[in-house]
Image: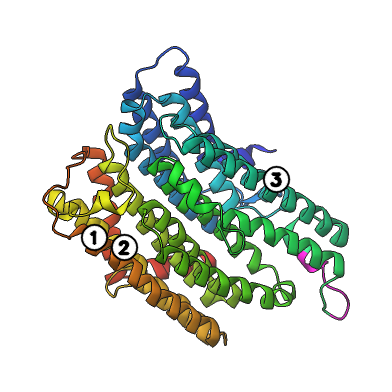
Amino acid sequence: MSVNDLLALTPILILVLGGTALLMVCAWYRAPRPLLAGGVTVALMAALAAGLVPPPATEISGLFSATSYARFFTILWSLLAAAGIMISARYVIDWRLGAGEYVSLVLYAAAGMALLSSATHLLGLFLALETFTLAFYILIACNRRCEFAAEAGLKYLLTGAVATGFMAFGIALIYASSGSLHLPEALTSLTTATGALQAWGFLGWGMFLVAIGFKISLAPFHLWTADVYQGAPAPVSGLLATGSKGAVVAALVGVIAVAGPVWHDLQDLLWFMAVITMLAGAFGAFTQQNLKRLLAYSSVVHMGTLLVGLICQSAEGNVATVFYLVAYVITSFGAFAVIASLADERGEPMHFDQWRGLGYRHPIRCAVLSLFLLSLAGLPATAGFMAKLVIFQAALHSGFTGLVLVGIFASLISFAFYLRVILVLYQSQNETSSWHPGSAMEHAVLTVCASAVLLLGLFPGILLDLISLILT
């Protein structure tokens, strides 16, 4: 690895070395607040480095890219890590979690997500994916006071191990068929002289897609999602629902850009997966009485919708997918941040009975939660509406009318279960108890997320133009 490669990796090195330094410091210094502040500072420094320091090389050791697209997602995941640490501060202090260990794991996860978003090599993709997955194995089960934490951690570990096996075997078959692990060459070599996908290559990509299905909760590989989200602390669930899945989708956008005819051979399979994912998530969420489980099934619906944009395999579809991804990350993380801000010594409000009437006890945060839920449903003037509009428009232009109709149907069902939560918030209940008033950092994160949801809903052109620029 050359000096230019190291300089291009500066944001990632800041996250990794900063996380390691905090991990070493916490062996002698256990006060949580400075460690948490250090973690937020490291994440913000990485975001600044990615945005302000131009890399001297656009390719890093043939494994990762340092293009504008890669730096865009490095900024996004670094800011997400900073926000995750901010809303985790009370958890770490009140529940006596190891501050240094917790912060370092979040920073390592952010580094893995940034690397995955920039992967140009199947080996780099595999290593980056496992980097943040290993961090989440620990983060999910870190709260030993929660009766569901150990179960959630074990379920994520088992499904993650299965997904890792499928991905490793799929990569091996792709290599055996193409003779290369570098994405452009590997994908080009998978087709025969007639343009058809080779049998071993088709099997390899099938196994690869099974692994991706587990990682981003595509049906029928989504059944672990609700249990894991329920058992993990709300800040970790928020990072898992947004950054973990978003990094995989960002990597897929890069893969599609060089996939060529390979992706066309898989379109029927992907079309079917998108349909059953959107419907399974929508109908699964409709029966839930637990808000975290409802948000878990909601994430399944949104992953299916993102797959619609990926299937288009067009410049418009890629722009729409990235815009949808950013809008979903902000909105979904904000919803989990509201849950985290209300948690106290009793735990987190999860069951609908605990949320009944809270709109009168905590009017501002419940109003913000309502905004996030309506954005996830696709209410006009919110980021969620614009995201669905651009992705369905791209699908129509690519000829996938059936997918659009299924997506609209799933969105209508989504309105029903999101509105049910809002109705619960404002049901009259005199005996409803108050929850934690929230900290200044939590309120700051909620303010930024709510403002971004409204700004992207009213002025989406700014982000769409930026995405179009970095994808060219």
Residue 12 seen in render: no
SS for callout 2: helix
Disc 1 to disc 3, how far (Cα)?
53 Å
Residue at 35 percent across and 54 percent down: it is 291
Q: Amino acid at mark 2?
A: Leu
399 vs 327, left or right, is right
Residue at 25 percent across and 52 percent down: it is 355
Q: Amino acid at mark 3?
A: Ser
Q: Which residue is mark 2?
A: 373
Q: Is residue 446 above or below residue 374?
A: above
Quadrant housing the C terminus: bottom right
Q: Nearer the viewer, residue 310 or 155?
A: 155
Residue at 34 percent across and 32 percent down: it is 91
Q: Is residue 76 above or below residue 112?
A: below
Quadrant housing the N terminus: top right
Q: Amino acid at mark 1?
A: Val
**Farthest residue, direction top:** 28
Q: Is the residue marked by circle 3 packed among few (<14), some (14-19), or many (20+) residues within 10 Å? A: some
Disc 2 to disc 3, how far (Cα)?
42 Å
Circles 2 and 1: CB atoms closer than 8 Å: no
Q: Which residue is mark 3?
A: 61
| Residue 447 pos. (x, y %) | 23, 51
| Residue 212 pos. (x, y %) | 64, 58
First along the sequence among labels 1 and 3: 3
| Residue 378 pos. (x, y %) | 35, 72
Q: Is the residue marked by circle 2 packed among few (<14), some (14-19), or many (20+) residues within 10 Å? A: many
Q: Quadrant of residue 36?
A: top left
SS for callout 1: helix
Q: Which residue is mark 1?
A: 424
